[in-house]
Image: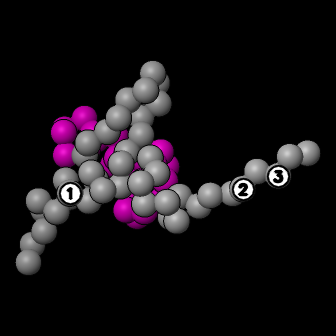
Amino acid sequence: MKDTPIISVRSEPDALLTKRHLATRLNRSGRWIEFRVADGTLPAIKLGRTILFSWPDVLQALSKFRVN
């Protein structure tokens, strides 16, 4: 069996995140992520039926809601 390196999503800042990984990072539900994509708050990349997220793009989008 060929050894495949395991790459943590957290260790790769430019890696694309799945909805589940993004929800975990933001401590939100997958449904909350879906609502934010639907209302245009979170930028997403759609490849077929798969929706992916760029962490830097998500941070930039959410920075608009910074209170201080």
Is 38 located above or below residue 62 in the figure? above
Which amino acid, mark 1?
Gln
Q: Nearer the viewer, mark 3 or mark 1?
A: 3
The amino acid type found where label 3 is placed reads Asp
Residue 39: tell me if it is visible. yes
Q: Residue at x 11, y 59 (%)?
A: 64
Cβ–Cβ under 8 Å for marks 2 and 3: yes
- Residue 12: percent from the left, percent from the top? 49, 60
Mark 1 highlights which residue? 60
Sequence-wise first label, 2 or 1: 2
> Disc 3 marks which residue?
3
Q: The C terminus appears in which quarter of the rendering?
A: bottom left
Mark 2: amino acid: Pro
Q: CA distance from mark 2 to mark 1?
A: 30 Å
Task: Write the residue at 30% across / 56% down.
Answer: 56
Please tell me how crowded label 2 is: few (under 14), some (14-19), or many (20+) other residues with Cα within 10 Å: few
Q: Nearer the viewer, residue 35 or 67?
A: 67
**48 to 4, vertically: above or below:** above
The numbered disc on residue 11 is none
The stretch of residues the image draws in magenta is: 17-41
Residue at (44%, 47%) from the top-left corner? 16
What whole-number distance in Å separates the C-alpha atoms at marks 3 and 1? 36 Å
Sequence-earlier tag: 3 or 1: 3
**Residue at the image position 31 percent from the left and 39 percent from the top:** 44
Residue identifier under label 2: 5
Query: Callout 1: 10 Å neighbours few (<14), some, many (20+)?
Result: few
Neighbourhood count class around disc 3 (C-alpha, 10 Å): few under 14, some 14–19, many 20 upward: few
Q: Secondary structure at mark 3?
A: loop
